[in-house]
Amino acid sequence: WLADRFYAWQGGRWALQNAYLTEHLVHRFGRDASTAAWFGVLALWLVARLRPGLSEWRRPLAYLLLSTVLSIALVSALKSLTDMDCPWDLSRYGGANEFFGLFSQRPSGLARGRCFPAGHASAGYAWVALYFFFLSVQPRLRWLGLSVGLGLGLLFGIAQQLRGAHFLSHDLWTLGIAWSA
């Protein structure tokens, strides 16, 4: 339903697929900023390992590093296994492929789909781990941490939906994976 509305709102095409805001600012810069944040946490963890006065930060920072990378890796691995198309690949939305459900047999010769769950949204939703990080080091900031992860995931996910790269269900599954990791 939502993809239908986004597609119709853009004039029956994915007009925002290559737009500066959605493609360059949110998609590319957002991905790079999330990666830079991960390396920033890695640097903090390395400093905490070297300084005895910061020893209480080692485990929470290690958890944050592992949780974020695990959720992104799980989403990436599932993308290679689920064989689902992006909206922009489907004939309903101007593409060439018919829709095949998650457990449906795809015709031989049809290129593999690599769209489910939502890889880009995982770069945002991975940061819901900040909730648990702050719960262990500064409990009063846990809701702020959760808000950051949810906000980034929503921003990345909605931008990708506007581009025709994902359905809402792709993003919701990605959030579930990130929360579980």
Image: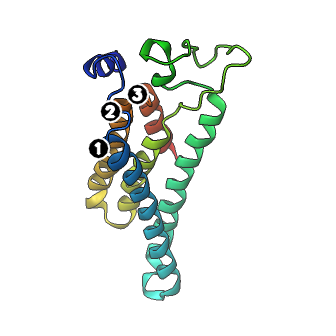
Q: Nearer the viewer, residue 77 or 138?
A: 77
Reading the image, the residue beneath label 1 is 21
Q: Nearer the viewer, residue 52 or 39?
A: 39
Task: Give SS at disc 2.
Answer: loop
Q: How dense is the environment of label 2, judged by Cα within 10 Å: few (below 14), some, or many (20 and up)?
A: some
Q: Is residue 90 above or below residue 14?
A: above
- Distance of label 3 from label 2 (alpha carbons): 8 Å
Q: Looking at numbered disc 2 in the image, what kind of residue is underneath it?
A: Leu
The image quadrant that residue 36 belongs to is bottom left
Reading the image, the residue beneath label 3 is 164
Badges 1 and 2: C-beta atoms under 8 Å apart?
yes
Name the residue: 36% across, 26% down.
Answer: 14
Q: Residue furthest right?
A: 108
- Distance of label 3 from label 1 (alpha carbons): 14 Å
> Horizontal placement of 78 versus 92: left or right?
right
User: Tag on residue 16?
Assistant: 2
Q: How is the image coloured?
A: rainbow
Q: Looking at numbered disc 1 in the image, what kind of residue is underneath it?
A: Leu
Q: Looking at numbered disc 3 in the image, what kind of residue is underneath it?
A: Gly
Name the residue: 48% across, 67% down.
Answer: 39
Say whether disc 1 or disc 2 marks the residue closer to the N-terminus. Answer: 2
The image quadrant that residue 9 belongs to is top left
Badges 3 and 2: C-beta atoms under 8 Å apart?
yes
